[in-house]
Amino acid sequence: MERADYFAAKLEFETDASDVHAARGAGENVIVIDVRSAEGFAQGRVAGAVHMHYSEIAERAPKEIPADADVVVYCWSPGCNAGAKGALEFARLGYRVREMIGGFEYWVREGYPVENADGVHRRPIDPLTGIPRIRTHA
């Protein structure tokens, strides 16, 4: 049971790009928070994400994010721990929060909607991380 408990806990605190995209597509009210720098956010982000650098969460979140929200945070990639820092800040405030493993890198590589100043775009799916599929919706 020790192993099952470990993996159950892991899934309670983590999610991935595919599950976030599916939850949003199913109409679930998931608030996605980009905890990277302003420059990273401007370069491109998960479409519809809110920018809140992890150092601002303690001050901004109680004013801007409903206390009963389902929150998902992400940073750049698996090589970045800003997502964990952001998730910790939300957790300290009592939010239901999960970290999106793979971060923005895997969101992009799997071909999900990316937003920047020019609008919403999709980049080609990386065949090493995503399965090319016919898209019928965003």
Image (tube, rainbow, N blue to C red):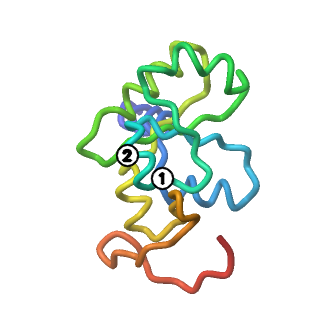
Residue 33, how many percent across, how many down? Answer: 54, 38
Q: Residue at x 67, y 81 (%)?
A: 136
The secondary structure type at the circle numbered 1 is strand
Q: Between 83 and 13, which is closer to the camera in this rendering?
A: 83
Q: Quadrant of the N terminus?
A: top left
Residue 42, how many percent across, how many down? Answer: 44, 49
Residue 53, how many percent across, how many down? Answer: 44, 29
| Upstream in sequence: badge 1 or badge 2 | 2
The residue at the far bottom in this view is 134
> CA separation, marks 1 and 2?
8 Å
Q: Residue at x 51, y 62 (%)?
A: 114
Task: Determine which quarter of the picture holds residue 59.
Answer: top right
Q: Are marks 1 and 2 in contact (CB under 8 Å)?
A: yes
Which numbered tag is attached to residue 40? 2
The secondary structure type at the circle numbered 2 is helix
The residue at the far right in this view is 27
Residue 49, how many percent across, how many down? Answer: 57, 46
Which residue carries the number 1 mark? 45
Q: Residue at x 43, y 78 (%)?
A: 131
- Asked if 2 appears above or below 45 in the picture, the reply is above
